Amino acid sequence: MHTIVAPFSARKRSPSASKAKAAKVAKVKRSLVAAGAGQSNRMDESPRGRILSAAAHLFLTRGYAQTTVRDLARAVGILSGSIFHHFESKEEILEGVMAEVAARSTERMQRAAGSAKTPIASVRELIRSELEAIHGESSEAMTLLATEWRSLGEPARARLVLARELYEEVWLSALRRASKELAPIEPFILRRLIMGMTSVTATWFRPHGPMSLDTLTDHILSLVVRRTARHAPTR
């Protein structure tokens, strides 16, 4: 297991810097589409999706530098040259893996936050959703965000930083709405603390062990609610 620490989490913004955020958020969708030539980065059963899935596994287990295009082609069961019908380079494949997990995680977070009935329940759902991403089927791709971040060139990093900001804004919005029930800590700092707790579970938590994901979620939530508001979390 690898510790998952986001290398490009949202930065704390000054009031003047925040004014530029709306334009950046709009820009990210255009940038990601342009980077992928308008193609999907879904890890599904399509040829492109199978390449991304194989890449997530091989880049994690062997390392990005040690994995060749031939290795990827062999894992998918295609000729090496066929990969270049879908991607221009190995780096584009790595960016595709990272973009997919960022997009999938953001969608999951938005659904989780939207399904909750109360602000504090929304925070709980976000904690659980993040834990599911770390320990579920996207765990390899999530880990690559940390372990192979430096393997990307600056343009790709810039596009992914923008994508991550969409994810972080879901969190910050939920923390602001639940602020009356949470510890009196600035949302930006509270988010960093929660991320630290969820990330480090990759080193010790076992999904099929004695503790359930729901119990782990409740433990983390109990550490960030106000002392006067501590109660059984609403599910």
Image (cartoon, rainbow, N blue to C red):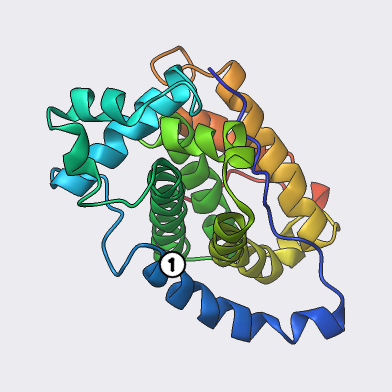
Q: Is residue 66 visible?
A: yes
The spot of residue 216 in percent (x, y) is 55, 30
Q: Closest to the observer: 73 or 172?
A: 73
The spot of residue 144 in percent (x, y) is 51, 35
Q: Closest to the observer: 157 or 115?
A: 157
Secondary structure, mark 1, is: helix
Residue at 44% of width from left, 67% of height from top?
Answer: 32
Q: In the rendered image, which residue does mark 1 sit on? A: 32
Instruction: Decide if residue 194 is on the left or right side of residue 163.
Output: right
Looking at the image, residue 41 lies above or below residue 1: below
**Residue 5's quadrant in the figure?**
top right
Looking at the image, residue 97 lies above or below residue 140: below
Residue at 40% of width from left, 55% of height from top?
Answer: 108
The spot of residue 177 in percent (x, y) is 65, 71
Residue at 15% of width from left, 45% of height from top?
Answer: 47
Residue at 27% of width from left, 26% of height from top?
Answer: 70
Instruction: Decide if residue 199 is on the left or right side of residue 43.
Output: right
Q: Pointer 1: residues within 10 angstroms few (<14), some, or many (20+)?
A: many
The spot of residue 80 in percent (x, y) is 21, 33
